[in-house]
Image: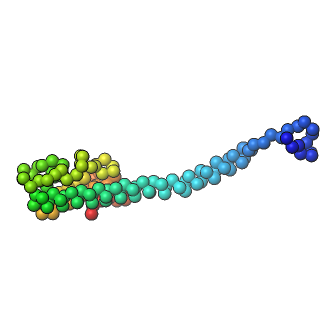
Amino acid sequence: MKLRRDMAPGATRMRGFTIIELLIVMAILGMLAVMVAPNLFNQADSARRDAVLSQISSLGSALDAYRLDVGQYPDSLDGLVRDTSSRSTWNGPYIRGELPVDPWGNEYQYESDGRDYTLMSYGADGRDGGEGNDADISI
């Protein structure tokens, strides 16, 4: 061990951080967390919206395949999973597994007159209308 010249022989110097140094580091980490956290939450919301758009696109492709086989769109999304048309041209199921729900756990809203359809998610609040994360999402 190396001794400093101003220390008495046999004395050792203790090393470590002072409370002030620790408080400064904690304050800096706190400020960084305050700046980064909102960006992370916005990324999660953006990812949910992207997932909805992807799922709606996939459901739309399945609906189009159904229409090509049966001649019209189904009355409900259940027609993609099981034969609700009672027609011999049904070649489903058109999606694997069960019908997906949106990232907020709500069912997709589907309406059809047989010739055209509307498919949407009500967003985070699960109700018609809204703004921001609660806004309706459709293609």
Q: Can residue 129 be seen in this view?
A: no
Query: Which residue: 27% across, 60% down?
Result: 57
Say which quadrant the C terminus sits in. Answer: bottom left
Query: Which residue: 24% across, 49% down?
Result: 96
Which of the two residues, 116 or 91, is positioned nearer the viewer here? 91
Query: Which residue: 14% across, 60% down?
Result: 67
Relative height, residue 13 to residue 27 (above, below): above
Query: Which residue: 29% across, 56% down?
Result: 55
Q: Is residue 3 visible?
A: yes
Percent coordinates x, y for residue 74 in the rendering: 13, 55
Quarter residue 3 falls in: top right
Relative height, residue 83 to residue 1 (above, below): below
Which of the two residues, 79 or 96, is positioned nearer the viewer here? 96
Say which quadrant the N terminus sits in. Answer: top right
Which of the two residues, 69 or 22, is positioned nearer the viewer here? 69
Percent coordinates x, y for residue 38 in the rendering: 49, 55
By what rule are the colours in the image chosen? Answer: rainbow
Percent coordinates x, y for residue 17 in the rendering: 74, 44
